[in-house]
Amino acid sequence: MNQDLSIISLVMGASWVVQLVIAGLLLVSLASWSVIFAKLVGLSRVRGRNDQFEQEFWSGKNLNDLYQSANSRVDAAPMERLFASGMREFLKLRERRLDTGAQLDGARRAMRASLQRELDAIEGNLGFLGTVGSVSPYVGLFGTVWGIMHAFVGLSNLQQVTLATVAPGIAESLVATAIGLFAAIPAVIGYNRFARDIDRIAIQLESFTEEFSNILQRNIGTPATAPTAH
């Protein structure tokens, strides 16, 4: 490709609408890449902390000790906060001497509410990637259509139209579609990857909720300092 048909020269020679579309798509692409890298690090950290707490939970440690540790830890894992919310409600209802069914139902409700909060936090910015992946190609196509229209209007003033006169205008218009795909493809791949990862984390947290509820049910009626995760 010669210098006149380089990407930079094509963009600089495009109409201001096409340039605005390209600039917007590039900014969106940079934003989506930042979200992708943040999600990769964040979800990896969530999985690691969840696995660490789950291993500690099933080690047979006293539940009250785990609860005190969860309350004092600033960077607690989502599963740890889920456990703390259920344990907190369970102990609160036990102190009020409610019946065993109310204690267990209260703990389950608290954990379900905490589960939803944790998933909402984990899913943050995932919708942005979905929007970028679905909208960017159409924005790029709009820039292409506008650029082609602009090119043909300019060609109407020429007496003789050849491939050499048509090619630059069409090429600069197609750059918008290419950049739209450049922004959309990584966003779609990231969205699908993170959606699967979040589904696995959600299943892990839901399973822990049920398992911990079973442990509480077995420990109902025992002294408050006795329950362990067996």
Image (spheres, rainbow, N blue to C red):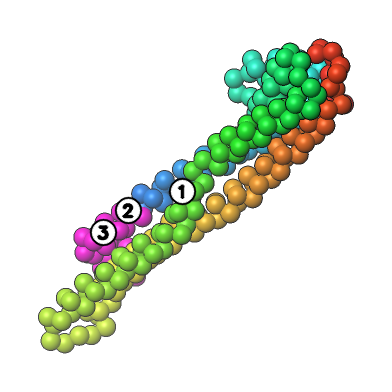
Q: Earlier in the sequence, mark 3 or mark 1?
A: 3
| Residue closest to the eye, 71 or 35 | 71
Q: Which residue lies under the disc numbered 3?
A: 19
Give the image location of residue 80, x and y in percent: 68, 26
Give the image location of residue 124, x and y in percent: 51, 40
| Residue closest to the eye, 127 or 56 | 127
Q: For residue 85, which quarter of the picture?
A: top right
In this rendering, which labeled residue sits more in front, label 1 or label 2?
1
Callout 2–callout 3 Cβ contact below 8 Å: no
Task: Tell me the kind of residue under disc 3.
Answer: Gln
Residue at the extreme front of the image, as rendered: 99
Task: Tell me the kind of residue under disc 1.
Answer: Phe
Point out the image quarter for the N terminus: bottom left
How crowded pointer 1 is (Cα within 10 Å; few <14, some 14-19, many 20+) is rated as some
**Dot 2 lies on which element?**
helix
Q: Which residue lies under the disc numbered 2?
A: 24
**One can see residue 188 in this view:** yes
| Residue visible at 39% across and 64% down in the picture | 138
